[in-house]
Each structure stands twice: as C-alpha cells, then as structure tokens.
Image (spheres, coloured by chain):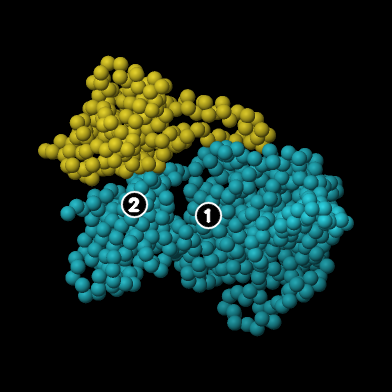
Chain colours: A cyan, B yellow
Amino acid sequence: MKQTIKITSLFRRGILGSLLLVTIVAGCKRSGKNAAVIGDDAASKVYVAPGKYDDFYLFTSGGFSGQVGVYGLPSGRLFKVIPVFSQNAENGWGYSEETKPMFQTSHGFVPWGDTHHPQLSRTDGNYDGKWLFINENNTPRIARIDLKTFTTSEVIEIPNCGGNHSSPYCTENTEYLVAGGRFSVPIGDKKDVPIDSYKENFKALLSLVKVEPTNGKLDLAVQILLPPFDFDKTRGGKGVSKDWFFFTCYNSEKANTMLEVNASQNDKDFVLALNWRKAIEYLNAGKAKEMNTPYLHNKMDESTQTATSEILKSEKVLDPKDCPGMLYYMPCPKSPHGCDVSPTGEYIAASGKLAAMIPVYSFAKIEKAIEAKAFDGDVDGIPILKYDEVLAGVVQKPGLGPLHTEFDDKGYAYTSMFLSSEIVKWKLGTWEVVDRMPVYYSIGHLCVPGGDTKNPYGKYVIALDKITKDRYLPTGPEECQAAQLIDISGDKMKMLLDFPTIGEPHYAQACAADLLTKNNQKIYKLEDNKNPYAIKAETETKVVRKGNEVHVYMTCIRSHFAPDNIEGIKMGDVVYWHITNLEQDWDVPHGFSVKGNNNSELLIMPGETRTLKWVPDEVGVVPFYCTDFCSALHQEMQGYVRVSDKNSSVPLKWSLNEQK
Amino acid sequence: MKKNILLTGIAAIVLLFGMNSCSNKEESNSTETTVSETSANNSSTGGGAASVKDDDSQPNVVKVASGSKDHTTLVAAVQAAELVDVLAQSGPYTVFAPTNAAFDLLPKGTVEGLLKPEKKADLQNILQFHVTTSMYSESMFRDGLKLGMANGGSVVISKKDGKLMVNDANIVGHVTASNGIIYVIDKVLLPTQ
C-alpha cells in the first residue's frame, strides 16, 4: 500500500519511466488473479444487513486454542468463542469453583487442550441441532457442547489412547462417537518399554463412546486393540453403510522415529472398516476383557450448575482375534488422511497425502468382497480386502496433497489439496475433475454445510486455511488463520469472502440457523437454580465463617451487589464469593472482580450462580466491581471488602445501603 | 404497602409496537431486495429494543405497563413521546406510573393537547419526569430521599407512617420488571419550570 502511494506521487511528478510500468504490471498480477475467481456479485452474496440474521451457523474448532468458534454464514461474523478445553479467564471457565472439575483428567488439572473436529449430532443421518461434540487431541478427551446454551456440558477422557485425533465422528443416529489414536502406545501392564520395541509392544486403539439419546450423556462403551498403525481420520457411515466406521491408517511401516520419512515407505497403507454393531454385539456377548486404566468423566449438572468429576477405572477391551467379521483393512495409497462418506453412504473417499490420485471405495463392493472372502492376506488376523475388488473408481491427478472431501446435494465432491492450495470439484460416478478453485493458503479441512449428512445444503464450501501470509493487514511474525467462503451453487466455484478465525480452524461444520435458533435458551430460571450456594433474594444474603473459610452469599442485579460492604475478613482467610445473578432478562450477565485476586474474574449469566475463590494478601480495604457493562449505572456497581490483621477483632458484618 | 393491586395482567404482551416496527420494515425494503438472494430465509430483527422477541425473560417495564388496563393513557403517551424503545433498554429504571384516573384529574383537554405532535417535547418532558435511572426497591426509599429524574428535574420521596409518596402523589402499589420497577401513583407529577 505504502509503495503504491509513493509511486503514484512520483508518477504525478513525472519522474518515473519504465520502472513504474514494471511495478504496475507486478501489482496488477495479484488483483488480476483475484478478479478471475471472485464473483462479480460477491459483496451482495455475503452482505447481511444490520439487524438481519445469517442463514447458517458455522462451528470451527479452535485448534491449539482448545475452544470452539461460532460464526455466521454468509457474513463470516464471529458470534462467540465457546470455552471448552482451555481455561478462559474472561468468564471464569475453569477458574470458578463450579467449572474447575471440567478440567480434571487422570493427569490432574489440565488447563489447555487442542481441539480438532467438531461433530454436530445427527438423527437419521441429518443434523438434529442437539449437541456439538469436539475432540481433544493431546490429553485424549471428547467434549459435548449443549446447543441450547452454547456451553460445554460434559468431558470424557479416553484412556489407553495416544493423540485422540480420529475423533469424535458419530454414527447416523449419534448412537456412538468414535475415538481413534494417532499414536500407538504401550498399553496394559507393560508400559515401561524401549521406544524401538514399537513393533512388539505398541498398540493402536479405537474407542466407541455411547451417547444417551435423551440427554447426550457420554459413556465409554468399548475399546478395540489393533496393530500399531496410526489412525488419522474417520467417518461414520450412513444409509447403506450406517453400521460401519471407516478409518484411514498411516504408518503401516510401524516406524517409531522420523515418521516423515519412515512412515512413507510403503506404496499402500490402509483404510480400516469397523462394523460397530458387531463390536457392540461382541461386547454384549461377553467377548471383552477388562482393563483398569483410570480415566475421568466430568459432567456439568444443569440443575446445580456445578460440575463433578468421577474417576472410572474399568474399560471393556475387545481383541479382534475374538471378533471375526468386525474389522477389515482395505489397501489405500500413500499415507491416507481424509476418509469421507458420500451422502448415500455408498462411496468412501480416502485421500493419500502423498498420492497423485483419490481412491473411492464402494460400500456395495466391500460387502460383496467380504462375502466372497476376496482377501489379500491379513494383518494380525484382520483380513485385507483386495484393493481392486472394493474400488469404485479413482480420481486421477486431482492436485497435490489431497486431504479431505465433502459432498454437495448435486452429486459432486470437493477435495482440499494442501500442497497445491486449492479445492478440486469432481463428480461421483465418473470421477472426473470438473472445476478448481485456488485458496489462500494451505487448506486443511473444508466444509460444505451439512457436508457429512444425507442431505447437504450444497450452497457453499468453506476452505479452512492454515496459513494466510499476505491476505490480511500484517500483524508481525504470526498472522491469523482464516476461512474462505466459496459459492458452489453454480457449475463453477466462486470465491466470495475471506474471514479470519480464532486459533486454527482445523475442521468446521455448519447447519441451518433455524435448527438452533428455535431452541435457544435466553436465561437460567432462578426458580430452577439448585446451586447449593444460590440465594434467590437480597434478603437472603449472608457471610458465613467456617474456620478460616469465609463464604459470601451475594446477589447482583442492575446496578448493585448485595452486600456491597463487607468487614471482618482476616489475613489467612480463604474467601469464596458465591454470586447469584438475580436478573431474569436475556443478555444481562454481570461480572465480578476483586483487586489483586490471583484468579480470574467471573461472568454470571441471568439466573446463574458462580463461585470465585480469593485469598486476600494484604491488610486494607479492597474494591470489587462489575466487569460486564450492564446498565446506565454499571460504573456504580461496586463495593468494598475490608481485610484486617490475622489477630484482629473486627466482627464479621455485611450490609447494603446502610445509612449512618 | 398493598402489592399487585392494579397491574395484574403482567405477562400479557400487548402488540403496541406494531406501528413502530412496520415503519422500520418499510424503510428497509430496499436493503431486503438487495440481499434476498443470500438471505431469503433470514429472520429479521425488527426495530428498537421494544421489538425484541423474547417470551422467556421476565417482562420489561414497557411490557408490564402495556399489560395494565389502568395505564392505557400512560402507554399511549409513552408511544406518542417515542419513549417505548428507551424504556425497553437495559436501564435499570424506576418508573412512577400515573393511572388513567390520575390523568383524568388534569384540567380537561390537557392530555389531548399533549398528545398532539407539536407538543411532543412537552410530553417527553413530563413523562421523563416520571422516570429515573436506577432500580429503587421499596426498602431503598427513605423519607426525604431526592431522586434525579430523566428530564433533569428532581422529586422527593416521603415516607411517613408507612405511607409512601412521591412529591404530592401517593404510591399505591408496585410491580417489578426485568429492567426496573414500576410504582403506581394516583397523580401526574408536574415538572417545576
């Protein structure tokens, strides 16, 4: 920009000759490239007028941020960041006493997570708008987000697992979520082993997590021990393939070091097909053995608004040797990554990162091959189906570095190409490439709204880009990551919009807005608040001492705290502020902060109770105030707490509006 | 104090704001045409704060007043003075709400005169003299308490023998709303010049 201005001014002075021409041509090159792919009417297609709603919700994983982003489409406006696996000092998630248990794991309190794959719950293969599930990659967990309140309701740890990447994809009716480890690890009693004994001592692991249909509660149903290949991605089948999960596996070389070289030696790795119904049948038939690795299950109780952590110590584990007909490998070229199922459930596209083609498998052929025992050997007793017998077709030379595929409502598929940084549109059945769209830059996943359902909306594809370089105003060495909205309603894709995202938008799913708006919860009803520290009126406020613990039962309402003057706190005390927001009015949270607190602030939603711990560290009168601009007299919403010496005789007392 | 004596139909939502939101819709028609291709199914939020669709929250002061058959004059005046959206905002407000009977005590023709478009400023001045920013619960009132009102004037609360007054009007009841509190009074408060 600066350069252009300078040149223009030089031009005015008539100083520049051929140099100017060169610069202008170079400058035009980029805008020329953009003009070719941006639809002329792009602005009107993404413009959502003030006061209007977007057509779709887009849920993006926050990647290394550990959270989930909620955006509108087509505008790309960010509405909310849902705190999930990372503590959020901004609202007290993971800091308040009620929410701390959500962060408990078998390793203790883990304040951060790595979210990768949002999965909207499905009924009959279509989004039902109930829940959003998201995996945590690093300390293997799955979270459930309630889409009435857009808050995290539950977190379950996945024991015996390394890197919960192939997760949390679900079955057609959300009967089960899956969790597959990207790392094979030593499992069981023998854990302290040399790393180079990988081939003998390491195991891959798949888990099926049951989802209670009425309330979404999660339960680790069964785990399956497998040869030590690394699981990358999964999809649950639908329609004809509804009883199956399909997983891509890389590192069939079983390398334990320098995988970028050593896991790229074989011409083919595998797609693993799991008949999950059979797995449950084997479980119910008592075929599973018990393992006893502790894992945590954290639940937010809707009525007490308080999370609890439960330690569980028993897993049911199936050995494929005892479970014929449950698992089949299918050869797949070169380190496959994405593994995606077409809307009918008939085609499974698996993309080898290093392959120059996309193999597409036919479910009908898979069934036939299983029946005909068309095997090409086995891996530890798990049959390998003959590649040619299960292949429906191949998309030849689609681009470089094919990763993920989503589908529209017209029989087309869209595959992201990481290396050539483009989206390639191809036709199911003919496997011919029909269109290409460059994206900026280094696309990973892509998302068609409803793209993993039986009925994709088919209006847009969203590119989820890892790197943006020069796409936005620069912000130092680290630039934002971003999404790009592309119109797929016509024959040719049209670029509509760039928008930055929180963290890394690893994967995203999008659903029609009215699926969620109709259930949106506006307030927590005060009468239903069963938090043990809740009080429902200012007349019930109190301060209670229990040894050196002081419990402040406080209320807030526009525009004061009750009480707002507290005395009798002593050095050495641990103060718990239990604050109930008495408001019963949509979008009127109150905030609470105390000077010098080695803790976060709180945001308390209407009708909610939250508790903040504070250990006073000096004698004096300490201010506290509301942090969420709530009303005309928000600035006046403040108070004082007096902290006295340890041996002081100042009595405990509290008041609001006490006049002398 | 007698509670709930007048404003019984609290939850009733009277569609008083139809005119307001209709006119806004007409204004935005041209915009709608432009975005109709992408946003055919877009729900629209209406006009000001009073048109927020929300049946779950406690009703705000506008909704409460609109549900009272004893305050139709006040509600009509609030509309004419274009204060509906203001009173649906986050506030919080303390509203002294004269009943229809209180308005009837004014000299004949006063109300009709104030409702004329050219008297809008006078009407706003009077109505804003009935509103203060803060939510005064009854226990916060003490004898002699001075309240600064929205029009810049001030009123005085008197509390004697359990009898509450604001200036020369008796406070005869109250209703709590989501964004404030309404005190029902038996006289219209007239701003001092």
**Could one spot residue A643 in this view of the protein?**
yes
* Residue at numbered disc 2: A636
Question: Which of the 4 quarters of the picture holds residue A491?
Answer: top right
Q: Which numbered disc, 1 or 2, marks the residue that appears first in the sequence? A: 1
Compared to residue A198, the image places residue B167 above or below, namely above
Residue A61 x, y percent position in the rendering: 61, 57
Near mark 1 (Cα within 10 A), the count class, few <14, some 14-19 or many ≥20, is many
Which residue sits at x=69%, y=41%?
Answer: A43
Which residue sits at x=82%, y=62%?
Answer: A355
Q: Are marks 1 and 2 in contact (CB under 8 Å)?
A: no
Q: How far apart are marks 1 and 2 (CA)?
A: 30 Å
Label 1 amino acid? Ile
Residue sitting at the far bottom: A194
**Could one spot residue A240 in this view of the protein?**
no
Residue sitting at the far right: A18
Q: Which chain carries label 1?
A: A
Specify the quadrant that holds the C terminus of chain B.
Answer: top left
Near mark 2 (Cα within 10 A), the count class, few <14, some 14-19 or many ≥20, is few
Side of A237 relative to A588 (left or right): right
Q: Which mark is residue A82?
A: 1
Side of A406 relative to B159 (left or right): right
Nearest the viewer among B179 and A540 is B179
Residue A19 x, y percent position in the rendering: 85, 58
